[in-house]
Amino acid sequence: MLALQKVAEGVGNIELREVPEPEMAPDQVMVEIKAAGICGTDIHIMHDNFPYWPPVTMGHEFAGVIVDVGSELEGWQLGDRVVGEPHTKACGHCYLCRTGNPQICTEKRSPGWGIDGAFTSYLPYPTHLLHRIPEGMSFEHAALTEPVGNVVTDVLLNAKVEPEDFVVILGPGPIGLMAAMAARAEGAREVLITGTDADEPLRLKTAREVGIDHVINLQQEDPIERCMELTGGIGADLVVDCSGAPPAIRAMPQDARKLGRLCAVGLTGKRPVEFDWDAAQGKVLTLYFNMSTHYSCWEPSLSMIASGKINADALITHVLPLEQWQEGFDAIEKMEALKVILIP
């Protein structure tokens, strides 16, 4: 079978290779991959800015169907349509795992970077990480569950959007757009999202089309001034960085009100960041750092996609066969795509 792999350390070094079909343990199921999304993490791996163990098949945002069931399992059947949490190889007995946080277990090796992932035809998987796809949901839509899960974990569960919050989202990429939709759907009174001239043709255009309240091009309008105008000079209740851009992170305390909340979602790609610590401390801000998804986000994420609270059709701009992976990666880097779904 074909698999898209990071074959060696260094920038690039991604190849489509013929590999043997994987073997399945007695306590696993075999998932036939029907759709898999390209994540920003995959771009970071391409540029050597995220941990990985080559050679490794990439891809961790997947949806598929069970085609074989291990002999030790009950409750799962051939034909079950599933998505999966990427918390494989978590040890299960450290203080993090035992407090319900396997997503940051030191031993964790997620598919796509730590072990072979979903940019291929078949993937063996432990059932304790699987969730069933709702009836009527397409595999392409279901493949968005993991990135939506990050937004639900980070913005709704951790930073806790509260009723009538004014929320600022920095960065209108796929995660930023999902965060804006989720915040608006789950209680925010208004959401302001920022971007640049480069974001205008697709990202900011999409933000307007999906009904985000205030869409600001920071190269044409001062977003902090606009935020203060809209909040009566108080500032935002919650500021979420989805860009990973050092200038955006530096501006977070300026957007926030006193006793406000900051939520870090975007990765910087190891770029150095300046942060006005004194301004944050003077406003007594709370800063939430985040990594990966929590178990409790997966069913809500599936529900939000199924209900249309997360507009999957607006987010999926490209559906490509696996063989055209380079086109998908290039489109993301050129900001000509939001979510790219690969079909093995």
Image: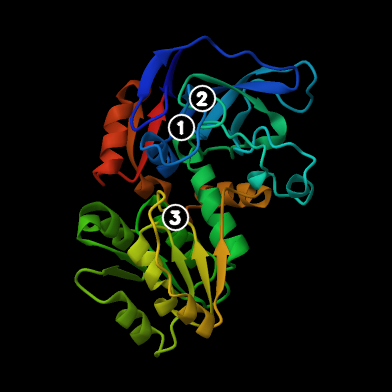
Tell me if residue 186 comes above or below residue 339 in the rendering: below
Answer left or right for 257 relative to 243: right
- 341 or 21, which is in the foreground? 21
Label 1, on which residue?
A: 36
Label 2, on which residue?
A: 33
Please provide percent x and percent y for residue 147. Answer: 49, 46
Quadrant (top left/top right/bottom left/bottom right) for the C terminus = top left
SS class, disc 1? strand
Earlier-in-chain disc, 1 versus 3: 1
Disc 2 residue type (three-letter): Ile
Please provide percent x and percent y for residue 234. Answer: 44, 88
- 93 or 162, which is in the foreground? 93
Q: Would residue 211 be visible to someone looking at this image?
A: no
SS class, disc 2? strand
Which mark, residue 266?
A: 3
The quadrant where residue 22 appears: top right
- 150 or 89, which is in the foreground? 89
Q: Nearer the viewer, mark 3 or mark 2?
A: 3
Q: Are marks 2 and 1 in contact (CB under 8 Å)?
A: yes
The quadrant where residue 246 appears: bottom left
The residue at 26%/77% (across/down) is: 222
Disc 3 residue type (three-letter): Gly
Q: Would residue 219 be visible to someone looking at this image?
A: yes
Q: Are marks 3 and 2 in contact (CB under 8 Å)?
A: no
Please provide percent x and percent y for residue 245. Answer: 35, 59
SS class, disc 3? loop
The residue at 75%/45% (across/down) is: 97
Q: Nearer the viewer, mark 1 or mark 3?
A: 3
Please provide percent x and percent y for residue 233. Answer: 39, 89
Disc 1 residue type (three-letter): Ala
